[in-house]
Structures are given as C-alpha cells and as structure tokens.
Image: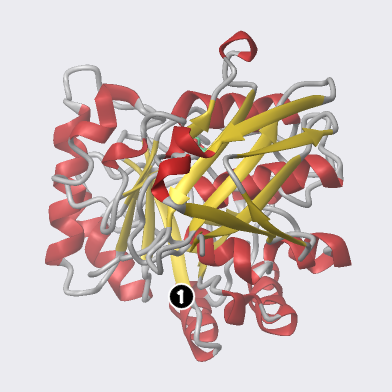
Amino acid sequence: MLVNTPPMGWNSWNTFGAKISDKLIREIADQFIKLGLDKAGYRYIVIDDCWSELERDPETGKMLASKEKFPDGMRALADYIHAKGLKFGMYSCAGVKTCANYPGSFDHEFLDAETFAEFGCDFLKYDFCHKPAHASGPLLYRRMGNALRASGRDILYSICNWGSDDIWSWARSAGAHMYRSTGDICDNFKSFTDIAQSQFEKFCFSAPQCFNDMDMLTVGMFGQGNVAAGGNDLTQYKNHFALWCIMGTPLMLGSDIRNITPEILTLITNQELIAINQDPEARPAFFAAYPPHLKGKCVVLAKMLSNGDYAIGYFNLTSEVHATTLYFDDMGFPFASGYDLAFRDVISGEDLGLKRESLIQRLEPHDCRVFRVTPVKRH
Ligand code: GAL
C-alpha cells in the first residue's frame, strides 16, 4: 500500500468515546459527502475503541462486533462507507485488552488481521494498553504489520504507542504508515501546543509511507465530547489546524461534524492549508525563527514545497502579544541571493506583496499567520 501524503479522515474517539453506533458512523459518512469533506481530501472514517463484544467468539476465536452498537455487523457498515467512495477504519490493541478493556489482539494478530480484512477494513489503528510485560512492543507491532500484509487487503497501519520505545526509529520498518508520537490530545490550548512543541524537531523521520502522527484534531469540539477539557476558541483552533498542516502530520478530524459551524468548516477545508500538509515532497518544517527567550513558544516554521514555494507560519503560542521577525537569511535567502519573497496569507487571502530581507509579524495571543511564499528574482 502506498501512502504518499499524510492520511486524512475522521476518528470517533475525541468526541464519542464509547458512544459509537452504526447509526452514528453512517451519519458521519453522509455528512462527509454533504460537507464536501471527501473533495477536500478527507477519506478515512475510523471507529476507535469500544466497537466489539467483551468476549471473542468461543468457537472461532474471532472478535465480534457489538450486537447492540452495530446490529448489521461491520461488513454492512464498510459497504455503506465504500459506496460513498470513502474508506473504513477500525481499531485494536497490541495488548491482551484495549485501553477501554475490550479484547486486544495479543497472540491473535493474524486471525484478527484476517477478520479486519473480512470486515472490509482499510485502516487499523493499533493501540498499546495491557501489553504483557515480557513482550517486546516493537516485536508486537511487527507481528501486526506482518499480519496486515498477509491479510490480502490494503490496510493502512496506524501505530499508537504514544511515542514509546523510540517509535520513530522502527515504525517504518514494522510496516506502519503513521505512528503516534505523543500521549493523548485533549481539547484545550495547552494540550495541542505541548504536543506540537514536543515534536517540532522530530519530523526528520516522517516521510512518505510512514508519517509522524501528533494525534487526532480537536478542531471544532468547543469543549464538548470525550476528550473535552475546557475547549478552544476559533483563533486557537486556527492555530491548531495550521500547526498540524505545516508540520505535515495526519489530519484526522475528531469533532462532531454533524454540528459543524461555518467557520470551522471553512478552516478544515482550506485548500491552501491542506495543500501545504499534502505537499507531494512531504519535507519537514524547520525553524526559520526561534527567539530563544520564548523557548519555542513564538516560532516561525518554514517548509519547502514541491513547486519551489515555501510555506511560512508565524505562531504565537503565548498569552501575550508578540512581534516576531523572520530574517530571510535565516532560511537561506541572504540579500546577496538576489531574491525577494512574495507573501500571500493562505487563511485571509491577503497578498502582502514582495518583501526584502525580513518580515515582522505582530500576533495577538494564541494567533498565527500562514503564508505561501514565492521567491522572486530582483531586476
Ligand atoms: C488511547 C489512545 C487514544 C484512544 C484510546 C481508546 O491509548 O491514545 O487515541 O484510541 O486509547 O481507548
């Protein structure tokens, strides 16, 4: 399976936790099409933890979908999702139980991978709770990587071990297409900024076929749902989404998209932001400005794009107004290069025109600005 750009979709956990059902997932699929999320690039609809019965089938040993939550079974649901041109994702765990105490795949990896293939599953998120102490985490993830490949179906493999065991150093070799590098996100400013800050310099291992996953987005949750913890406002969600885009991490929505506000829909379908995330070269962002006294709380991130442009994001992660200067020399464009830079704000659409040598941006608390920047030779 080829996964050339960060996967995009929706996952049930952030908002719904255990409160999932066939009806809900079908409504989400309907909403994908109604809102045009599919056209914006979102493809995977992933059911997280709590989808199964508490016991395996006593005869076959197979996992069983909860009769109460999914009375028609998983295959029917997968067919419904596929008929809309979307992809269907599921969840299991490398331990004996999932984090919410449903059966895990430990020692059942090959049988479970076959079951997921029978369900018509296209994506497996694979968690890390209840792992027997004697078992090696990397080996268990390799087992499931092998099992998925042997299943005969293209299944995107999403490792979720919260960044333990130096995940970046072996996830790719275990067959993963994305690997969670941090603990769980919750819906507030501190949570997503802590996560982003912890990964600013860890993206050198993230590349086509295997992407660093900073967790599902909380954008648009506004303090409601399973990982609600105070919520964010629109400015903060803009910052969250922009960080995920420029850092090139998977874009898995986590809000109840059945009740989305127009502003959030505009944000998560911003084609220019998404194009930065989905750039075919998938180069990592680097620090173009990093005022040391602000310890990574006010940064300018820049990312080379495949057509010769750059994405440049100014991020204010502090609670004060800050002005940050980007000196073009710090991203390899000294005055002597003979190039000026043309800036276009991809969120407001404002064209700032040509800038020479530096650009200062004054940002309100928690605000950001993201530009698409084109180098232009001076006459
Ligand atoms: C956590 C995981 C979450 C969610 C949850 C389900 O370990 O990081 O994203 O999947 O388990 O119980």
- At horizontal 56% and vertical 54% (from top left) the residue drawn is 341
| Residue 370 visible, this angle | yes
Quadrant in which residue 124 is drawn: bottom left
How many residues crowd mark 1 within 10 Å: few (<14), some (14–19), many (20+)?
many
The furthest residue to the front: 379
Q: Residue at x 75, y 58 (%)?
A: 256
| Mark 1 residue type | Lys
Helix or strand or loop: what does disc 1 sit on? strand
Of 355 and 113, which appears nearest the observer? 355
Find residue 226 and report its horizontal and vertical position in percent.
Answer: 71, 40
Whether residue 11 is visible, yes or no, is no
Please tell me whether residue 18 is drawn above or below residue 294 in the rendered image: below
Does residue 306 appear left or right of residue 378 in this picture? left
Q: Label 1 CB, ligand 1: below 8 Å? A: no
The residue indicated by pointer 1 is 87
- Using the image as rendered, state which of residue 102 and residue 135 is in the foreground: 135
Q: Position of residue 80 (x, y in %)?
A: 54, 85
Position of 276 compared to 28: left or right? left
List the single residue furthest toward the top. 293
Q: Is residue 170 above or below residue 78?
A: above
Task: Please say if 302 is above or below 161.
Answer: below
In x, y percent, where is residue 184? 55, 31
Left or right: where 378 falls relative to 26: left
Residue found 33% across the figure and 24% down from its top: 164
- The image's colour scheme reads secondary structure
Vertically, is 305 above or below 34? Answer: above
